[in-house]
Amino acid sequence: MKASSTLRSSTADLHERVDARVRRFLANGVEGCRDFLRVSRDIVVPWEQELRRFSWPEELRVRDRLCKSDWLEEDVGPFQAEGVFAHAASSAEAWGALYVFEGSTLGAAIIARLVGGTFRYLEGYGAETEAMWSSMKVILDDAIRSEEDLVGSVTAARRVFAQFEKELG
């Protein structure tokens, strides 16, 4: 089984719980969306700082990907919170975290259609969002080759989802 498929199935329970929490925020319209984006910023910013310390394949275009912090700060103000522990002990764990944040661009596009408003984060990569997601999965599947790496990537992805679940209440 491909790493991306394993990550999807191994995080489905947490993903579903996070989605339910996000829907509660979105029930409050644009202001609820803004609150959700504040929580996202407080998780994404430290994780992107952590992910920048890893080497990534050139074709991943990591500079184009690790910009969600900027988008969120543009939408809801500068990062000031502390408390989210963002650490990847290996490149496999970094891939697991990246998987969650890249997948969030797909969810953001759905949120954008639901709430409208002008939030840069929800625009993601624009017309390139689907292609960026697809290419990331291909590169991820090539990078995660061993069972040990797969376990590490799943562990980190679940950790990131759990942080969202906790912070979204």
Image: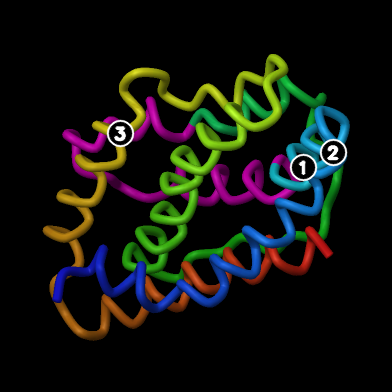
Q: Is residue 36 magenta?
A: no
The span picked out in magenta is 41-66
Query: What's the amino acid at mark 3?
Result: Glu
**Depth order, front residue of 89/128:** 128
**Rendering quarter of residue 69:** top right
**Rendering quarter of residue 38:** top right
Q: Is residue 65 magenta?
A: yes
Q: Find residue 88 and report its horizontal and vertical position in percent.
A: 48, 65
- Quadrant where the N terminus is found in the figure: bottom left
Residue tagged 2: 32
Q: Crowdedness of circle 3 by 10 Å Cα count: few (<14), some, many (20+)?
A: some
**Is disc 1 placed on a helix, strand or loop?**
helix
Q: Residue at x 64, y 32 (%)?
A: 114
Q: Main secondary structure of the magenta part?
A: helix
Q: Nearer the viewer, mark 3 or mark 1?
A: 1
Residue tagged 1: 26
**Is disc 3 placed on a helix, strand or loop?**
helix
Q: Residue at x 84, y 65 (%)?
A: 169
Q: CA distance from mark 3 to mark 1?
A: 23 Å
Q: CA distance from mark 2 to mark 1?
A: 5 Å
Q: CA distance from mark 2 to mark 3?
A: 26 Å
Q: Crowdedness of circle 2 by 10 Å Cα count: few (<14), some, many (20+)?
A: some
Does the CB distance between marks 2 and 1 fall below 8 Å?
Answer: yes
Mark earlier in primary sequence (2, 1) = 1
Q: Image check: 141 left or right of 27?
A: left
Q: Image check: 81 left or right of 61?
A: right
Q: Find residue 153 and report its horizontal and vertical position in percent.
A: 36, 71
Q: Residue at x 47, y 67 (%)?
A: 157
In the picture, the disc for residue 105 is none
Mark earlier in primary sequence (3, 1) = 1
